[in-house]
Amino acid sequence: MMAESPDPTNPFLTRALTRWGVANTFEGPMRTEGEKDLQFLNLEQWEKTIIDQRGESRPCLTIDQIGEPYRQLVGQMRASKPSLQITPVDSGADIDTAEAYQGLIRHVEQTGGAKAAREEAFKGAVGPGWGYYRLYTDFEYSDSPDPIALFDQCIKYKPIENAFTVFRDPSTPLHEPWKCHWALHVEDLPTEDFTAQWPEALATNADCFAATGLAMPDWYPEGAVRVADYFYLEEQDDPNSPEMALLADGRVVPFAQAPAGVAILQRRRRRLQVVKLAKITGAEILEGNEDKTAGREQPWPFIPIVPIWGESLTVKGKRSVRGIVRAARDAQRAYNYQVAELVYELALSPKSKVVMAEGQDEGYTEMWKRAASEAYPALKYKPVSLLGQPVPPPQVANFTDPAKIQALVVAINQAKADLRSTTGWYDATDPSRANTEQSGRAILARKESQAEGAVNYKDSFGSALLFEGMLLLGAIPKVYHRQNRVLRIVGLEDETETEEVTVGQPRKTRKSQRGVQGIFQWGAGRYDVVPSVGASYTTRRQEAADLGMQLLEVLGKTHPPMAAAVAPMVIRQMDIPSSREIADRADRTLPPEVRGQEQDQDDPEAMQAQLAQMQQQMQEAQQMVGQMTKAIETDQVKAEAEAQRTQQSDEVKLKIAAMELQARGQMEQAKIAADIRVAEMKIAAEFRLAQFKAETDLSQQNDQQAHEAAQGSAEAALADRMAAVGHAHDMETGEMGHRQAMEEQRERPPNGSASA
């Protein structure tokens, strides 16, 4: 029995339908262009009007050139293995809990269908320009005998194959999805399925849209009913946080306890942001709270619809989002048209006609009919017409224009180049580049340019992963909260451990034979998410193995013991069967101190053996130290003797040099003294000669005054000569001292010994 029609003025339902209309209107142009992009990817690249104009006589070929770069971008994403790195932020967080978060997120990704959901959304971002995927909670399958385990929930991913079924708040910033206030994810269910799932719901209602102004076919298409998951945010006061006041003196106190006489600068109450979900049709609320008047609370901190965008632009205040198809559509149309025309022109060649006079094919009619399909050794004809007049042989009428075919080939190549530039895709196997680019550097440069042109898609995917990590961090403490619930933690190499959740108890760790198990508390402290969009771990492991082999080759020549220590690590990275077993066996051949593995602290025998081994190693080390000490002492004695011998040799050399310098100085002094003596004797002789001459002049003139003048002149001349001799003596003495100093400098030992 059908339920009665609800009140069309229901404010909750009216608001939800109005929001859907706002989003539908705002995204209308973007959705129209996105549909065309999808049609091109679906090989619907000819417009219907052009197909009708060409008719059946001219082909409408579709040689897809956009699909290759589209598949290449999607393939790069599929080959990667994105990951979420969880790091502690404040003092209440710790690394062990961050690793537990990260390991649980890996488990959720593996079992919840993260790969398929992300791929569908990324395909939408590359194609029409946007894509979405959802996170939701569901009951977890459990074979535990504990009945409470039947109510355990887990987080899963939901792919959204049709991105046009999501209607979001248009005011949301494109790259801040956590600011989205509402969103609707719609689905058109066949009427039979809808009635079977909600037997008491209204399958059709034409009167309930009067208050909203929406058309009924939008929500009740023919033979189906549109059902929407309506997410919305609702702010509530935190019941555990009273209203606080900021005082003028800088103190923050409860508003009710604010002291009198102190000015209150601000007053605030902590607000909680709650996500709610209601499943609705255009006429009623199918699922929500208990009385079906609103939505029910969700564990998510934000609306759990993750968007991935392509290339975004804002033109005249309107947002436009597109993928790689939009700019390449015209080039693809031109390519299809030119190829179709070329095929049409080439197809006319076999249909060329033969021009002959009437009666020339008489007797050979069947031969000429089959001439286009059969290889006759000769084509016969009559050389006369029906009137018996001689005529030339038949001629083939060629309706194909070679110049037109050449022009079409040039146009095809130009259209193909336009496709490469609009999609940013480089084909290294293109035969047209065989003679133009032979160097690997040129090919690598083009590939790097292609990767740089597509980096916005990779960056957008990283932003989506960041938002996904924020959703998971907020929901995990609320979903995986049951006391003593066992969780599966997945490591980097897909190894699995178990963790137990204990609410309200301090975190601790213990060891067991099954491995390390942790007891910790969710929600303690703050954690951040760092997304990584790179090569898969398998690719990194192969790269590490290649580098490890090169390192082993170098160490094998320079340091064989180090090569033996590194070999197990390199073997463990190899992508071969039983690589871990081989590495473990190689590890066991190494000493424990080289292996770097900790012994089990709970095994007394192992500890005793390790202690004995360490004592033996200490004894060997002491013996080695003694030997090295003796060797050092012997070497030190040799070094001291050698130094003493070197010092004595330097002193002898220095003394010999000093004696030679002293003898050389004495010889110089004797030579100078002899020169001075000769000069003095010469001056005395000249003086006596001058005196004798003066006396002779005086005796001749008998003039006492003249005699005194002559005597004074002789004395003055004598003084000048003596001064000149003294100056020469000083110059010789200074030059000899300078030479002696230079000789001492040359003879001094370079190391500056003590005797020097």
Image (spheres, rainbow, N blue to C red):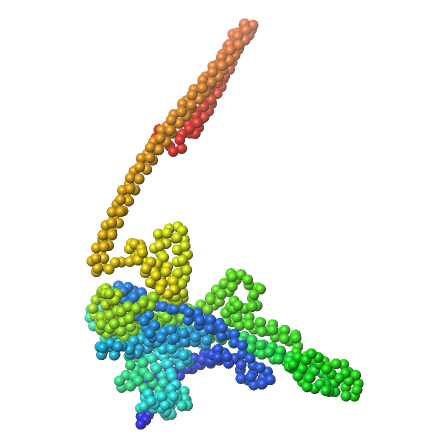
Q: Quadrant of residue 114?
A: bottom left
Which quadrant is the C terminus positioned in? top left
Can residue 407 be seen from the camera position used here?
yes
Which quadrant is the N terminus positioned in? bottom left
Q: Quadrant of residue 578?
A: bottom left
Residue at image location 21% in from the left, 55% down from the top: 608
Residue at image location 31% in from the left, 67% down from the top: 495
Rendered position, 247 above or below 218: above
Rendered position, 671 above or below 519: above
**Residue 749 in the image: x percent, y percent?**
40, 31
**Residue 241 in the image: x percent, y percent?**
23, 72
Question: Along the line of sight, which residue is nearer the eye, 751 or 248?
Answer: 751
In this rendering, position of residue 736 left or right of residue 204: right
Residue at image location 65% in from the left, 81% down from the top: 374
Residue furthest to the right in view is: 389
In this rendering, position of residue 666 left or right of residue 587: right
Can residue 101 be seen from the camera position used here?
no
Residue at image location 29% in from the left, 39% down from the top: 630
**Residue 641 in the image: x percent, y percent?**
33, 32
In this rendering, position of residue 115 left or right of residue 391: left
Rendered position, 687 above or below 343: above
Residue furthest to the front in view is: 377
